[in-house]
Structures are given as structure tokens and as C-alpha cells.
Image: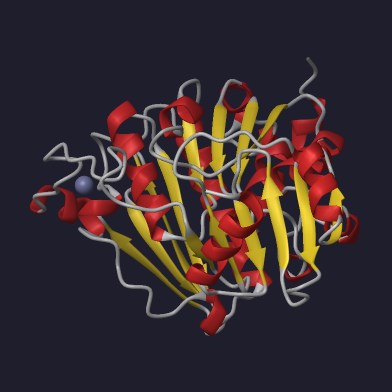
Amino acid sequence: MSLERYRKQMLFAPIGTAGQTAIRGTRVLLVGCGALGSVIADSLVRAGIGALRIVDRDFVDLTNLQRQVLYDEQDVQQHLPKAVAAVARLRRINSEVTLEARVTDVTPQNMLELLHDCDLILDGTDNFETRFLINDASLETGIPWVSGGVLGCSGQVFLVVPGATACLRCLLPEEPPQTETCDTAGVLGPAVNIIASLQVLRALQWICRGDAEPNRFLTVVDAWSGQWQQIDLAPLRSAAVCPACQGGERAWLRGARGSRSVVLCGRNAVQIAPSGEKIIDLASLELQWARLGKCTRNPFLLWFQPREFPDLELHLFADGRLIVKGTEDLARARTLYSRYLGG
Ligand SMILES: [Zn+2]
């Protein structure tokens, strides 16, 4: 396979031919393909990553287009899942990359399977619960991950290499309370692009590191004011008695924490998930729901606007998850779930 298309990148000495070969040999799991995930996936695929598995639970919504650079209006009209729309676009960018879309939640039950053949995890999530789950899985398997988060016009990035750097729980022993979300603070596209680009840089550094020590700094950026901070996390690692990386606790991976029924940040939407395994026959349900309102189907989900609740849009995935748009009321969404799906 020719490396000609990567020539400019290989001219950069820390990458070179050896680095490019290492990039080509790396398999990445991307958890979440919203704003950060779009930029991460785009950059990794252009850089010639070997394989990228994208897992995302959501579909493309009009309000995503302001910052989620992989998607367009046609994806919105077709109610396409983000992972599917992303892979379709990425294939046109670089057909040499092995790409895989998974339309699902990341859960304690599927986390290790999603991860099993990967070398690195990139965090494209928008919530701490999933980040703590990724952190547990990383420590359990020894697979490093690059964390990123952005809110308003600021954000932060750090790399976790089990056994060599501090982990998320060295930094935050517990999930912090969500005092501000992108619903209240908003989020700017350029800030997302900066943070996601820093995550990709961290990833490329780790892949091409040679004998160098992994980057142990937390980078905090306020893009509006232009302030950058580099915080050395090494003292944290040596001082902390971390329950996870030193104590071996895996509370999120063992499923002791977390729930799959959640309010989706910034979307005026909630997700209701069935408690066990559920496979839905979308085609036959479409016939039933077509009598109760507007209903269309694509290979991945059913879109439904009930006549009796014209303010709501229901998106039902084949794995039984329902995303209700138009409310942030979990109880109301649960009632709808049992009304239209039973149980
Ligand atoms: Zn730790």
C-alpha cells in the first residue's frame, strides 16, 4: 500500500516512516461520535489509522450541524444514526481504513467486547458516567485512552496509560455533579475543534512515541480568552491512593454504577433503554404505529410522531432503545415507552 498520501505528515520528523507504519498498525475504539468524535474520527482517518470502530447511540439532529463536522442536512432528513452516517462519510475520505459502525450504548455488558481487539480508546462522550466506564475498562485491559471534554468555549485533554500515568479517578475520585451542561453553557464549534485536535495529537504522540515517556500533562484551554494551562499529573499519581488504578476497584465496569435511561445533554431529549436484551421487529411495528401517527423507517431505526402528542418525536432503535425528542422528563418518556412498546 502506497504511503504517498501521507507524505506531508511523514516529513514531520517525530512521525517519519516508522511513525506512519505504527499509525497504520493501530486499531482505535471511538466512544461517541458527536462534536468531539466527529473531529477525532475525521483526523484519525485522514492520518491513516489502521482501523476505527465508532460506537454511538444517537441519530443526527439538526442542532448537531453547528459543530458536528461529519454530518449534513441529508443525514438529518434520513434520521441516520451518527455512527452509520459517520462511517459513510469517512469511507469517502480514506478507503484504506477499516471502519466499523456500532449503533448502541456503551455499557458494562458490551464495553470489553467493543474494546477487545483495539490498541487505543478515544473519548468522544459528553458525560462522566461513560468516561468512568472507559477508565475502568482501560485499567482492566491495559489499553490506554485519551480523555477530552468541552463546555462553552473551554475544555481539557489528558492521556491515561495504565501503569504509567494518572487515571481519571486519580483526578476525580467520584463523578462530579453536573452543575453546568452544554444546555446551560452552550458549546462553540471552534473550541470543540481545538480540544478534539489535541486529543488526536495526544493519540499520535502515543502511537509514534518510540522510547519516549507518555505525555503526563492535563491541558486546560480557555479558547475565548486564549489561556492555556499545562498541569503535571505525575505528582497526583505518586501521592494519590486511587481506588481504581491502585486499589483495583472497577465500580462502573462491574455495573454497580450507572443507568442507561438518561437525559441527553443539550438535545431536549431522553433515552429509555430496556432492562434486558430486546430485539425489535421494526417492520411490523411500523405498520402498527402508522395507524397512530406519522411513521417512517430506515434500516436502523423507526421514526414516529404520535398524533396524540404532536410535540414529541420518537426514535426507536432495533436494540429496543427509545429516544424521545421534545421532553427532558424521564417519567413521561418511560410512560410513553410502555404505552407504545409494552412492558
Ligand atoms: Zn488512578
Residue at x 71%, y 60% (from the top left corner): 314
| Residue 20, percent from left and from top | 63, 27
Q: Which residue is outermost to the top?
A: 1
Q: Is residue 123 above or below residue 127?
A: above
Q: Is residue 324 above or below residue 328?
A: above
Q: Is residue 216 left or right of residue 210?
A: left
Labels in figure, total: 0
Residue at x 20%, y 58% (from the top left corner): 173
| Residue 328, percent from left and from top | 55, 74
Q: Quadrant of residue 213?
A: top left
Residue at x 81%, y 38% (from the top left corner): 283
Residue at x 23%, y 44% (from the top left corner): 251
Who is closer to the viewer here, 83 or 97? Answer: 83
Q: Is residue 180 left or right of residue 95?
A: left
Q: Is residue 330 left or right of residue 282?
A: left
| Residue 177, percent from left and from top | 31, 72
Which of the image's four quarters has the N terminus? top right
Who is closer to the viewer here, 320 or 234? Answer: 320
| Residue 54, percent from left and from top | 62, 38
